Every structure is written in C-alpha cells, then in structure tokens.
Image (spheres, rainbow, N blue to C red):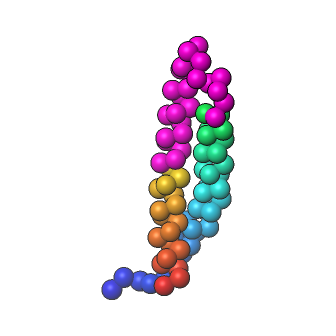
C-alpha cells in the first residue's frame, strides 16, 4: 500500500519547488515580454528571435514539469 504522507525527501522537494516555480514563472514572463517587442521581428534580429523562442519553449517545459511535480506532492500532502 502506498504511503499517503510525504517522506522527508518529498517535503524538502516540495519546499524547494515553490521558489523554483516563482523563478520559472518570472523567466517565462520576461521572455514573453521580450517577444512582445516589435523590433525583435526585424530581419536583422532573426538569430535573437530564434534564441528567445527556444529559451521560452525550454523554460515553459521546465515550468510545466515543476508544476506537475508540485501538484503531485501537494495532493499527496493533503491526502
């Protein structure tokens, strides 16, 4: 039977996830703000645009994964 409470390691992980989520959310917002700048779409800035899009996709994926894990741990801690 699976334990319904968090292990010590899971509690530590949960404690670290909250600031990590905030950091990733801030990073995603900053990248989105950069992509809102019309100047980024100039032909001379294509490399920068590509880099921003890749960084946004990577950061968003990290945020999604961290949020999923946070949700799992929160659900387990409230069981």
Q: Is residue 1 visible?
A: yes
Is 78 rendered above or below residue 73?
below
**Which image quadrant is residue 20 in?**
bottom right
Q: Residue at x 65, y 56 (%)?
A: 22
| Rendered position, 27 above or below 77 | above
Name the residue at 49% across, 76% down. 75
Viewer-proximal residue, 65 or 3? 65
Direction from residue 71 to residue 30 in the image, left or right? right
Q: Quadrant of residue 45?
A: top right
- At horizontal 52% and vertical 47% (from top left) the residue drawn is 60
- The secondary structure making up most of the magenta span is helix
Q: Give x and y (percent) for residue 14.
A: 57, 68
Marker count (numbered): 0
Front-lying residue, 76 or 34: 34
In the picture as drawn, the residue positioned furthest to the top comes out as: 44
Q: Residue at x 59, y 18 (%)?
A: 42
- Whether residue 7 appears in this view of the structure is no
Residues drawn in magenta: 36-61
Report if residue 60 lies within the magenta region: yes
Please say whether residue 50 is one of the residues in the magenta stretch.
yes
Q: Residue furthest front?
A: 38
Residue 43 on image: x %, y %: 55, 15
Residue 27 in picture, x, y percent from top left: 63, 44
Q: Position of residue 32 (x, y in %)?
A: 61, 40
Where 39 sits versus 54, above or below? above
Observer-nearest of 40 and 23: 40
In which quadrant is the N terminus drawn?
bottom left
């Amino acid at each position: 039977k699976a334990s319904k409470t968090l292990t010590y390691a899971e509690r530590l992980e949960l404690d670290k996830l909250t600031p990590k989520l905030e950091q990733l959310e801030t990073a995603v917002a900053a990248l989105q703000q950069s992509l809102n700048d019309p100047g980024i779409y100039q032909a001379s800035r294509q490399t920068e645009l590509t880099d921003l899009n890749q960084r946004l996709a990577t950061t968003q994926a990290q945020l999604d994964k961290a949020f999923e894990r946070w949700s799992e741990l929160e659900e387990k801690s409230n069981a």
